[in-house]
Image (cartoon, helix red, strand yellow):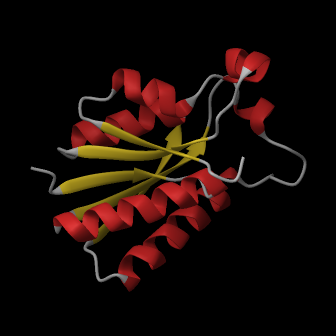
Amino acid sequence: MYQDLLLATDGTDGARQATEHAIELADRLGATLHIVSVSEDGPHSTEKKDEMRSDPEGEAVEALEEAERSAVQRDLEVTTTVRHGVPQEEIVDVAEVNAIDMIVIGTEGRTGLDHLVVGSVAEEVVRNAPVPVVTVRDRTE
């Protein structure tokens, strides 16, 4: 039933926890793990950047490679993709184009004004995904 899992990662603590969860799921199900990281563009991308984060492409690649290393250590079949654009749109598109059975994504737990202004990538993926979505809450909050 679940042969192709999509892990969306951006290298944050929540995404690392989602990576662990996705790897465990893929291992138990004998599934292929497809990993996507998005070099963010879009209306709120500059609001999310801080002064130390000036290379969104490099960060996307680094997040992808970190997740891939962890999956390969468990002998999983893995594919990787870096996309450019609005994260929630790109994640949903990867799921649609690649016949993904399930998406695994971390949540940051934004609340209040920050949530209203920036929104939640995970929330938008849940709303728009063509397949089930497993959200993994950041336990370090």
Name the residue furthest left: 1
Q: Is residue 56 above or below residue 118?
A: below
Report whether 34 appears left or right of 53.
left
Closest to the observer, 83 or 49: 49
Report whether 15 appears left or right of 80.
right
Q: Is residue 54 above or below residue 88?
A: below
Q: Quadrant of residue 11?
A: bottom right
Q: Is residue 75 above or below residue 56?
A: below
Q: Quadrant of residue 42?
A: top right
Closest to the observer, 2 or 50: 2
Q: Is residue 54 above or below residue 123?
A: below
Residue 117's x, y, as percent?
A: 72, 17
Identify which residue is drawn at 17% across, 44% down.
99
Closest to the observer, 47 or 15: 15
Identify which residue is drawn at 27% across, 53% down.
5
Name the residue furthest right: 51
Residue 88's x, y, as percent?
A: 48, 32
